[in-house]
Amino acid sequence: MLKLKSIPKTHLFLILILLFMFIWSALKPDQLGTWFLEVIPVILGTIIILYTYNTFRLTTLVYVLLCLGFIIALIGGHYGYGKVPLFNWFKDYFQLGRNYYDRFAHITGGLAAAMTIREILLRKFQLSPKFLIFLVLGLTLGVSASYELAEGLVALIMGKAAEAFVGLQGDIWDTHWDMSLALLGAICGLLSLSSIHNRYLALLKHY
């Protein structure tokens, strides 16, 4: 059980905004079946976070990144990744060949996954800096590949009904792009946020 008195206000705010976005996302989504498939990782991730909150509390930085990633998934689930209005505007204005919201989602998802994995590894194991980077990038790419394999399995089971969920938008290299951009997001996260993350981790020693 979560003890409300022990939860920082920032974490409560993240929980409330995620709950609000989940309710909004569930109201009249573009395709209910696709929405459900898209938000399953959000539901499972939130359950794991809440279940482990008292025994293995992550840093606020990682919780913010995970919340951001979950919100992006909820928006994609509501509209359909190929139909998000803002990115449709980008598509029309810049005369692009596709809606790039899914590409954006994979970059931010890779970043959030990488920083989460980095924290778990640093707190559980003694690793050299170079090996840590290699392991974080490898595991992030593994998570991304696992998601793509799950998409493929759903496509095999559901056939054309899974087209919106898979979201190729006519690009035969979509899966490769998704994994590559998740890896790019992980690299960007390690380069830009590692020093900030280390300061958050140092604060944990005071509790």
Image (tube, rainbow, N blue to C red):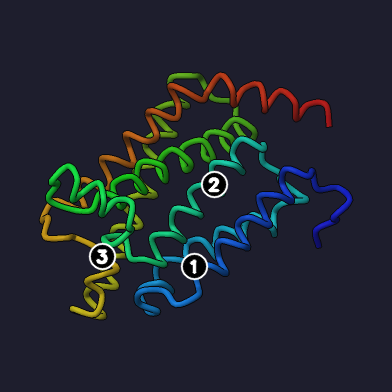
Q: Nearer the viewer, mark 2 or mark 1?
A: 1
Q: So how many labels did they put on this image?
A: 3
Give residue 104's mark.
none
The residue labelled by disc 1 is 25
Q: Can you identify the residue that label 2 sits on?
A: 66
Amino acid at circle 1:
Ser
Q: Earlier in the sequence, mark 2 or mark 1?
A: 1
Q: Which residue is mark 3?
A: 166
| Mark 1: few/some/many CA within 10 Å (<14, 14-19, 20+) | many
Residue at image position (49%, 19%) is 129
Decide which of 150, 188 is in the foreground and name it.
188
At a point 56% along the width and 19% down the height, the residue shown is 195
Q: Is there CB contact under 8 Å for labels 2 and 3?
A: no
Residue 24 x/y as whole percent = 53, 67
Q: Quadrant of the C terminus?
A: top right
Residue at 74 percent across and 51 percent down: it is 12
Q: CA distance from mark 2 to mark 3?
A: 22 Å
Q: Quadrant of residue 181?
A: top left
Q: Secondary structure at mark 1?
A: helix
What amino acid is at disc 2? Leu
The quarter holding residue 137 reads top left
Q: Distance from label 2 to label 1 (Cα)?
A: 17 Å
